[in-house]
Structures are given as structure tokens and as C-alpha cells.
Image (cartoon, grey):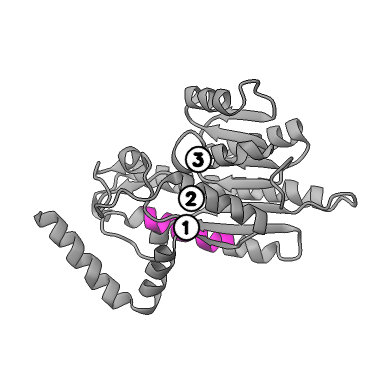
């Protein structure tokens, strides 16, 4: 798919990966719909990317709100006439032992990471289905749902977050099968450790990443996403070692269990 003139919706665009994707795609001339919970950051990003505001629509709100999710798609179609790509990037992290998680945190994590993504995918796929059914329309639609490599390898104190991302994978693959006969691609993005404010803004314990490495630059993630749109990739890993991590866990679960238990206990002692 050509990014030029495409209509791309990016949720969670006020920081981290979402913001980096917006910066990467803007020079291609696509029409961007940026959403987030912080109006000031949306305004600043719009002013940075296109001071005139032309071909950028900013919508402030929380994807936990189903009506806001519906409004994103409605406003996109009303403003630009269609939607070509939806990037479900909005998400919230959590770090606490499962027995210590308050009910409110359960609700926030699931409604942000799973419900909001599911609602937006539902609304977007309906809109894309209507436009791809038109005789003159030859463009494909694409939904990119942001998961995580730890959906396959839950870490201690990140059980609820990992579970929400595992749900994203099952939802995405099921939707992909349902849309197999349409012109809509459903892709899953598996970021690994990324250098963003994600760890500082997560719910629960305010701890940093388990590994000393601060992670890769979100701009590198954005480059991979850009290629995934152009080439319509289905399963998107950022680095070769992210893929090895996932495959090692699937084939050698006992070994990876022991490794990470050892690593975490060593980190606590230090």
C-alpha cells in the first residue's frame, strides 16, 4: 500500500511509538488522524508535523470510552472520506504481583489494551468493508494491532499486562480469519524493549525495565511499521533477537522460565 494520500489513524500518538510513527509517516503526504489523552501534546505534534494543520485531524480522548472509539472512525470518514490504515497503539503497562492488583487497575489495563483496540478494529473494519466493496475502490485496508513480545513470555509482576496482549493476539488472528475474503489485512506488531516513557507511566509499581539496556529508539519501530504498511506484513517483529526470544520460549519454555527466574532474583539481590 502506498502511504501517500492514504488515511492513517494512530491511537496513542502523544508519546513513544505512536508519536514516532506519526513523525515517520508525515513526510509521505498521507492524511493522519492522531488520537491521545493529552490535548497539548496533540497540538504540539500537529504544529510540528504540519503547522497549517492541513491533512491532520487530532482527536483527544480515551479509548476506554466506546463512544470515543466510534467517534474516531466517524470523524475520520467524515473528514477524509475513508480510512485506509488503523494503528491500534494506545496501551497502558502494569507492574504488580497478581495478588496485589486493585480492581481499578484490572479495569484500566483491559479496557485500554483490549476493549479499546477491539472496538476500534470493529468500527474500522466495517468502514473499510464498505469502501472496499465499492467498484471504483482498489485500495486495501489494514489494521495494525500493537501487541508485545511478552505476550508469549509473561514476566513476574507483569502478568495482567501480558495477558491483555495475549488477548490482542487471539482477537487479531480471529479477525484476520473473518476478513480473509475481504481486502482488509490484519497485522500484529510485536515490539520488544523500547526506549519510551512507557515504564514511567505504567500503573502499579514504578519500576524500570528488568534489563539494563534502555531499549531501541521508537523511531526504529516506526521504520518497521512503515515497511509493514507498504508490504502488508501480517506478523511484525522489530529485531531479529525479539523473534529469537519468542521462538526460544515456544520451543524451550522450561529453560526460559528458569533463565528469567534466575535473572530477576539476581537483579533483586543487586
In this view, 192 is above or below 16? below
List the residue tagged with mark 1: 238
Mark 3 vs mark 2, CA separation in Å: 8 Å
Q: Residue furthest front?
A: 27
Residues tagged 3 and 2 counted as in contact (Cβ below 8 A): yes
| Relative image position of residue 74 (x, y in whole percent) | 70, 35
**Pointer 3: residues within 10 angstroms few (<14), some, or many (20+)?**
some
Q: Would you say residue 150 sits in the magenta stretch? A: no
Q: In the rendered structure, which disc, 3 or 2, sits on the residue that comes first in sequence? A: 3
In this view, 108 is above or below 141? above
Q: Please name the residue shown 66% across and 47% down the image.
A: 85
List the residue tagged with mark 2: 221
Which residue is at the front of the view, 178 or 128?
A: 128
| Relative image position of residue 255 (x, y in whole percent) | 27, 76
| Relative image position of residue 165 (x, y in whole percent) | 45, 56
Mark 3 vs mark 1, CA separation in Å: 14 Å
> Residue 20 got which mark?
3
Amino acid at each position: 500500500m502506498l502511504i501517500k494520500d492514504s488515511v492513517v489513524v494512530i491511537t496513542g500518538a502523544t508519546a513513544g511509538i505512536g508519536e514516532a510513527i506519526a513523525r515517520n509517516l508525515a513526510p509521505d503526504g498521507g492524511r493522519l488522524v492522531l488520537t491521545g489523552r493529552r490535548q497539548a501534546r496533540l497540538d504540539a505534534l500537529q504544529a510540528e508535523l504540519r503547522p497549517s494543520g492541513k491533512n491532520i485531524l487530532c482527536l483527544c480522548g480515551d479509548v476506554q470510552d466506546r463512544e470515543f472509539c466510534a467517534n474516531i472512525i466517524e470523524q475520520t470518514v467524515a473528514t477524509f472520506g475513508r480510512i485506509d490504515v488503523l494503528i491500534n497503539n494506545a496501551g497502558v503497562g502494569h507492574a504488580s504481583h497478581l495478588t496485589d492488583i486493585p480492581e481499578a487497575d484490572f479495569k484500566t489495563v483491559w479496557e485500554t489494551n483490549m476493549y479499546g483496540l477491539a472496538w476500534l478494529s470493529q468500527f474500522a473494519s466495517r468502514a473499510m468493508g464498505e469502501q472496499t466493496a465499492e467498484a471504483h475502490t482498489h485500495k486495501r485496508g489494514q489494521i495494525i494491532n500493537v501487541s508485545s513480545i511478552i505476550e508469549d513470555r509473561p514476566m513476574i509482576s507483569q502478568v495482567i499486562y501480558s495477558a491483555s496482549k495475549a488477548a490482542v493476539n487471539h482477537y487479531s488472528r480471529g479477525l484476520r480469519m473473518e476478513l480473509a475474503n475481504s481486502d482488509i489485512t490484519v497485522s500484529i506488531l510485536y515490539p520488544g524493549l523500547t526506549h519510551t516513557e512507557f515504564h514511567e507511566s505504567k500503573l502499579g509499581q514504578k519500576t524500570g525495565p528488568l534489563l539494563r539496556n534502555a531499549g531501541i529508539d521508537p523511531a526504529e519501530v516506526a521504520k518497521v511499521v512503515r515497511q509493514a504498511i507498504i508490504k502488508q506484513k501480517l506478523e511484525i517483529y522489530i529485531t531479529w533477537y525479539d523473534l529469537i526470544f519468542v521462538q526460544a520460549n515456544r520451543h524451550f519454555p522450561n529453560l526460559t522460565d528458569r533463565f528469567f527466574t534466575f535473572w530477576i532474583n539476581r537483579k533483586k539481590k543487586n
